[in-house]
Amino acid sequence: MKQIEPTALEKSPFEMIGKDWMLISSGDKEKYNTMTASWGGVGVLWNKNVVFAFVRPQRFTYEFLNDNDYFSLSFFSQEYKNALAYCGKYSGRDVDKAKECNLTANFSENAPYFDEAETVIICKKLYIQDMKEECFLDKDLLSNYAGDDYHRVFVAQIVKVLKK
């Protein structure tokens, strides 16, 4: 993979995140986890190129994101859609997702990512905040939280983008 500037991303983040999905991964070489996500964002905040990742507290990856300064977002071609579906359905508490999906873990800036990805964004956490019911202006959105399991928002600086 070669390193590119964040501004050189050619594909729409709406397509990359919302349509193609991504793996959010955090941890170290001893222990890490990954999960599939289709909610998130890319933008500019505090004069930095950033990502916004949203993770529910019951997800195993949540623990890794809280305990580590870095995480990655890995984006794959359509041939990996079943692998991403698997990583969204099963918990890393119970299975080795990378092994089950034939994904090869690699590390950059202490963040795990996968060699099979087409694009990888390495991120350093800047800010976290838990979403709260009273902060929703459009109360219809609360239907996404039937279990009151509000996401934690992770805002992170993009420190590196890798592209095949």
Image: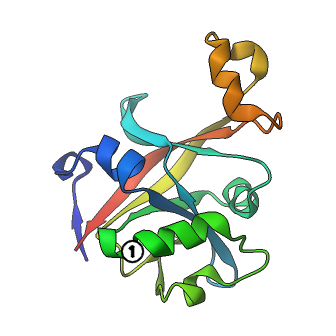
Q: Which is nearer the eye, 84 or 44?
A: 84
Q: Position of residue 76 (x, y in %)?
A: 35, 68
Q: Which is nearer the eye, 107 or 115?
A: 115
Residue at 26% x, 50% y: name it: 6
Q: Residue at label 1?
A: 80
Residue 70 horizontal side relative to residue 148, left or right: left
Quarter of the image containing the C terminus? bottom left
Query: Considering only vertical position in the picture, is 12 above or below 115?
Result: above
Q: Secondary structure at mark 1?
A: helix
Residue at 41% x, 69% y: name it: 81
Residue 94 horizontal side relative to residue 89, left or right: right
Residue 154 at least partly seen: yes
Residue 109 at least partly seen: no
Residue at 80% x, 53% y: name it: 58
Q: Which is nearer the eye, 84 or 68?
A: 84
Query: Considering only vertical position in the picture, is 106 above or below 162?
Result: below
Q: Position of residue 151 (x, y in %)?
A: 69, 39
Task: State the residue lying farthest toward the right.
Answer: 147
